Amino acid sequence: MANLTVNDDSFQKDVLDSKGLTIVDFWAGWCTPCLMLGPIIEEVADENKDKVKVMKLNVDENPTTSMKYNVMSIPTVMVFKDGKPVETFIGVQPKAVYQRAIEIHSGE
């Protein structure tokens, strides 16, 4: 997976102005569950690169966006469709959960 990072400055362009599905992984380097989730999110991104854009946002470096979306626990994974949040997952979830969300929100 190409490491697609997003930050407070690029969030509008990379996520909110984006058409289709975008998954944003809100994480931090000190968060053990976040590090456990990393490979799962990478697999989801690799297997669905034609259906979804996957971005990572470091909450320590980007507090404005994290606060705007009320991210209180990490990891938090948000699914955006055409720039609007449509589903949120808190904590590490199995790959199948993210895969199902892609299927539901992409209309498959």
Image (cartoon, grey):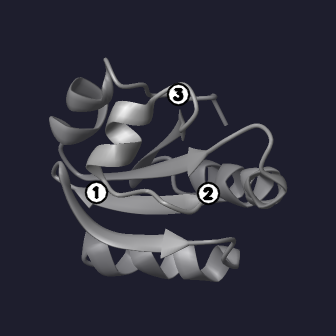
Q: Position of residue 105 (x, y in %)?
A: 28, 73
Q: Position of residue 81 (x, y in %)?
A: 22, 58
Q: Residue at x 63, y 81 (%)?
A: 96
Query: From the viewer's perspective, is the residue at label 1 or at label 2 nearer?
Result: 1
Question: Label for residue 5?
Answer: 3
**Image position of 37 (left or right of 68):** right
Q: Is residue 102 visible?
A: no
Question: Label for residue 55?
Answer: none
Residue position marked by numbered label 2 in the rendering: 47
The correct choice, above or below, for 76 with respect to 14 in the image is below
Q: Residue at x 28, y 57 (%)?
A: 80
Query: From the viewer's perspective, is the residue at label 2 or at label 3 nearer?
Result: 3
Q: Residue at x 63, y 29 (%)?
A: 2
Residue type highlighted by circle 1: Phe
Residue type highlighted by circle 2: Glu
Residue position marked by numbered label 1 in the rendering: 80
Are the residues flagged by discs 2 and 3 in contact, CB closer than 8 Å? no
Are the residues flagged by discs 1 and 3 in contact, CB closer than 8 Å? no
